[in-house]
Image: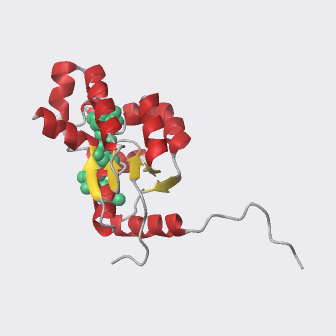
Amino acid sequence: MPAMKLAGNFFLVGLMGAGKTTVGRALARRHGKTFFDSDQEIEARTGVRIATIFDIEGEARFRERERQMIAELAQRKNIVLATGGGAVLDPENRRQLAAHGTVIYLRASIDDILTRTQHCTNRPLLQTADPRGKLEQLFAERDPLYREIADLVIDTTQQNVNLLISQLEERLGQPPKPLTEPDQA
Ligand SMILES: Nc1ncnc2c1ncn2[C@@H]1O[C@H](COP(=O)(O)OP(=O)(O)O)[C@@H](O)[C@H]1O
Ligand SMILES: O=C(O)C1=C[C@@H](OP(=O)(O)O)[C@@H](O)[C@H](O)C1
Ligand SMILES: [Mg+2]
């Protein structure tokens, strides 16, 4: 059992392959929270993979499904939610996430992301001749949006999941800094 209990909802944001689903599931298990992954919920409801939704309906319709799903899940209590990497593109999603929980931005180097995602066929945006170039473009577009709503930024590059959870707990458990320095008597 963890020494401290984390209160409220936790929302994980960051690029594909940053580890949102993996870290989110472990964090939820350790702190007795219900885990959701917005992509997995969309797949469960539609009965098809994310790649098939992109193929048949296109990215814009996927984003609508994602917006609906995040609006619904953000209302729940005591959850950990792993969002899809593009969820922050929508201002309404950013508003929902910032308003209803602690937002954790997971970062990773492009090299690590490429290694982690190279055999995956269910990330349609990376099914391109130049996944590195695509990730660099997505990072440039999205990093400011992740930062806009993040309460905490954690770098997962070359970090094992258990150590990441300890790091998260340590940083979330820190008492808030006083606004002013105590008087020097
Ligand atoms: N800290 C880590 N170190 C090494 N591999 C990782 C780490 N976090 C995730 N992975 C692996 O990378 C892949 C993508 O992780 P995932 O959690 O699905 O990322 P995301 O949900 O952010 O796209 C998975 O195969 C997962 O096992
Ligand atoms: O970055 C993106 O736009 C996407 C990320 C994916 O989720 P992960 O970040 O969990 O891979 C998934 O939602 C979809 O393929 C689109
Ligand atoms: Mg994921």
Q: Residue furthest left?
A: 47
Quarter of the image holding residue 119? top left
Please, is residue 71 above or below residue 182 in the view?
Answer: above
Q: Is residue 40 left or right of residue 85?
A: left
Q: Is residue 7 left or right of residue 54?
A: right
Q: Is residue 59 left or right of residue 168?
A: left
Ligand 2 quadrant? top left
Front-lying residue, 156 or 95: 95
The percent coordinates of residue 63 (x first, y second) are 31, 27
Please, is residue 160 above or below residue 154 in the view?
Answer: below
Front-lying residue, 34 or 90: 34
Q: Quadrant of the C terminus?
A: bottom right
Q: Which residue corresponds to the image point at 53% horizontal and 51% vertical from the top-left? A: 151
Q: Which residue corresponds to the image point at 20% horizontal and 36% vertical from the top-left? A: 42
Is any atom of residue 117 visible in this view?
A: yes
Quarter of the image holding residue 89? top left
The percent coordinates of residue 172 (x first, y second) are 50, 64
Q: Quadrant of the N terminus?
A: bottom left
The percent coordinates of residue 150 (x first, y second) are 51, 47
Q: Which residue corresponds to the image point at 44% horizontal and 46% vertical from the top-left? A: 100
